C-alpha cells in the first residue's frame, strides 16, 4: 500500500491519470500495454516518483520523462540514466526488436543494437513509436491493486478521470491512425478490442489480428511469454515491411 504521507494535489492526480504515453502520437507504430509498469524500481522509489509523474505533460519523450524519475541501477538509487544505465525491462527490449525487424535489420536480436535503439530512439518525441497503456496508474504486477486503491482514496472521481482518459486515447488513435498497433497482454484482449473498436481474429496460435491486419494482439512482453519466434512469424508474414 502506498503510505498515507504520499499525497497528490488535484492537478497532480489529473496529470498522472491523464497521461497518454511516451513518444509521438503521430508515429507509424503504437505499442499498447496493460498498465504503467514500475520496472526495477523499489517500492519507495516508485512511491516518491508519483510526485514526478504529477508533473508529466499529456505525452512525454521517454528519455526526458525518465530523467525526472528515480530508479535503481547497480545497487544505487538515483536519476534514471539512459546514457550509461539503460533500464533492462523486457518490455522495452521486445519493442526495440520489433522496430529493428521492421527496418529490415538482420541484427534485430543483437543485445547491443537493442540497447542502442532503447537509448536513442524508443518512445522519442520525434521518433517512430508511441508507447501507451490501458491504464495510466502504475502497478508492480497484474495483481497489485494498491495503487488504484490509493488513487481512489485521494479522489472519489478517479473512475471518471480514467474513463475520460480512455476516450481521449481512443480519439487520439482515430485521428492519428497509426500504420501498426501492437497490443501485448492476451488476458486483456477484450479491453484492447474495445479501445481499438475492433474484433480480434486468429492470426496463428500466438497472435490475433484485426480485420484490416493493422492491429495485432501479442503475448505480454515479459515473464517469458513473448519469444523471438513470434517476431520471426511477423517478419515472414510481411507484417513488419
Image (tube, helix red, strand yellow):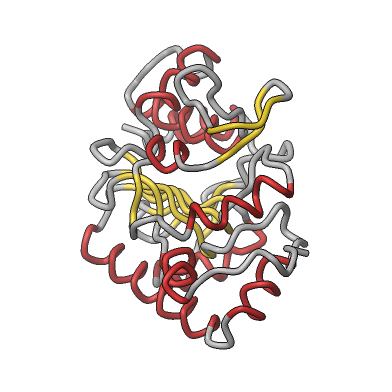
Tell me: 147 left or right of 12: right
At 34% from the left edge and 60% from the top edge, which residue is drawn? Answer: 58
* Above or below: residue 219 compared with residue 83: below
Quadrant where the N terminus sits is bottom right
Count of residue discs: 0
Q: Nearer the viewer, residue 129 or 83?
A: 83
Q: Nearer the viewer, residue 53 or 169?
A: 53
Q: Nearer the viewer, residue 79 or 134?
A: 79
Q: Nearer the viewer, residue 56 or 161?
A: 56
x, y percentage for residue 129?
34, 41
x, y percentage for residue 188?
61, 64
At 42% from the left edge and 65% from the top edge, which residue is drawn? Answer: 15
At 54% from the left edge and 81% from the top edge, which residue is drawn? Answer: 158
At 75% from the left edge and 64% from the top edge, which residue is drawn? Answer: 3
Tell me: 227 left or right of 44: left
x, y percentage for residue 211?
38, 61
x, y percentage for residue 33?
53, 53
Tell me: 194 left or right of 44: left
Splitting the image into 4 quarters, where does residue 27 fall?
Answer: top left
* Above or below: residue 235 compared with residue 43: above
* Above or below: residue 168 compared with residue 181: below
Quadrant where the C terminus sits is top left
* Above or below: residue 225 compared with residue 183: above
Amino acid at each position: 500500500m502506498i503510505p498515507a504521507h504520499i499525497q497528490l494535489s488535484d492537478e497532480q492526480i489529473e496529470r498522472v491519470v491523464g497521461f497518454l504515453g511516451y513518444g509521438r502520437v503521430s508515429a507509424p507504430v503504437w505499442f499498447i500495454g496493460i498498465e504503467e509498469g514500475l520496472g526495477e524500481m523499489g517500492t519507495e522509489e516508485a512511491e516518491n516518483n508519483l510526485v514526478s509523474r504529477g508533473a508529466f505533460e499529456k505525452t512525454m519523450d521517454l528519455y526526458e520523462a525518465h530523467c525526472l524519475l528515480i530508479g535503481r541501477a547497480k545497487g544505487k538509487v538515483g536519476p534514471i540514466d539512459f546514457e550509461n544505465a539503460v533500464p533492462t525491462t523486457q518490455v522495452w527490449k521486445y519493442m526495440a526488436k520489433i522496430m529493428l525487424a521492421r527496418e529490415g535489420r538482420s541484427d534485430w536480436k543483437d543485445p547491443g543494437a537493442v540497447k542502442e535503439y532503447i537509448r536513442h530512439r524508443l518512445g522519442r518525441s520525434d521518433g517512430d513509436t508511441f508507447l501507451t497503456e490501458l491504464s495510466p496508474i502504475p502497478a508492480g504486477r497484474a495483481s497489485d491493486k494498491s495503487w488504484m486503491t490509493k488513487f481512489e482514496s485521494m479522489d472519489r472521481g478517479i473512475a471518471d478521470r480514467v474513463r475520460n482518459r480512455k476516450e481521449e486515447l481512443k480519439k487520439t488513435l482515430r485521428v492519428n491512425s497509426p500504420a501498426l498497433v501492437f497490443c501485448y497482454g492476451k488476458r486483456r484482449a477484450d479491453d484492447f478490442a474495445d479501445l481499438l473498436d475492433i474484433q480480434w481474429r486468429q492470426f496463428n496460435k500466438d497472435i490475433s489480428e484485426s480485420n484490416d491486419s493493422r492491429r495485432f494482439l501479442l503475448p505480454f512482453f515479459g515473464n517469458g511469454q513473448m519469444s523471438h519466434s513470434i517476431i520471426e512469424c511477423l517478419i515472414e508474414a510481411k507484417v513488419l515491411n
